Amino acid sequence: MTKKQKEVYISYTKLGSYRKVADLKRESARETIGGISQKLNNASYFTIQRNHEMVSALLHAYCSMGE
């Protein structure tokens, strides 16, 4: 993951909106919504998020088995 991808990744995780990230980045460097989308895709953001959700669901199911 490049430095710019990581910055966008962290900002999007915190803010949850392309527009909010673009507005935040506009202060320091111009960033388009398309550029943000591309950086998140190249950083595998959505795959990582789905994996986090799956692991959480599996852990929840595993913990429920003991009840």
Image: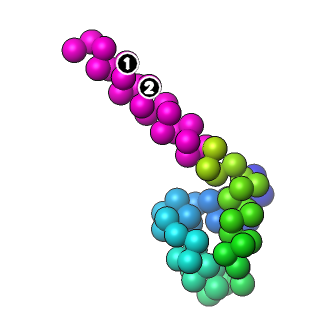
Which mark, residue 58?
A: 2
Relative to 63, is 9 above or below?
below
Relative image position of residue 39 (x, y in whole percent): 73, 62
Q: Which residue is drawn at 57% across and 83% down?
A: 23
Can the viewer see residue 7 in this picture?
no
Relative to 58, is 26 above or below?
below
Relative image position of residue 37 (x, y in whole percent): 69, 65
Which mark, residue 7?
A: none
Relative image position of residue 11 (x, y in whole percent): 56, 66
Which colour assignment does the render follow? rainbow
Q: What element carries label 2?
A: helix
**Three-letter amino acid code of the residue under disc 1:** Tyr
Q: Nearer the viewer, residue 12 or 4?
A: 12
Q: Which residue is drawn at 52% across and 69% down?
A: 17
- The residue pinned by badge 1 equals 62
- Graded by Cα atoms within 10 Å as few (under 14), some (14 to 19) or many (20 or more), the crowding at tag 1 reads few
Q: Are marks 1 and 2 in contact (CB under 8 Å)?
A: yes
- Graded by Cα atoms within 10 Å as few (under 14), some (14 to 19) or many (20 or more), the crowding at tag 2 reads few
Which range of residues does the magenta coloring cover? Answer: 48-67
**Three-letter amino acid code of the residue under disc 2:** Leu
Relative to 27, is 19 above or below?
above
The dominant secondary structure in magenta is: helix
Whether residue 59 appears in magenta in the rendering, the answer is yes
Relative image position of residue 57 (x, y in whole percent): 42, 31
Can the viewer see residue 11 in this picture?
yes
Q: Which residue is drawn at 37% across and 18% down?
A: 62
- The part of the image, by quadrant, that contains residue 21 is bottom right
In three-dimensional space, the C-alpha distance between marks 1 and 2, rounded to whole angstroms, equals: 6 Å
Taking the image as shown, residue 45 lies to the left or right of residue 14, namely right
Taking the image as shown, residue 59 lies to the left or right of residue 27, namely left
Q: Is mark 1 on a helix, strand or loop?
A: helix
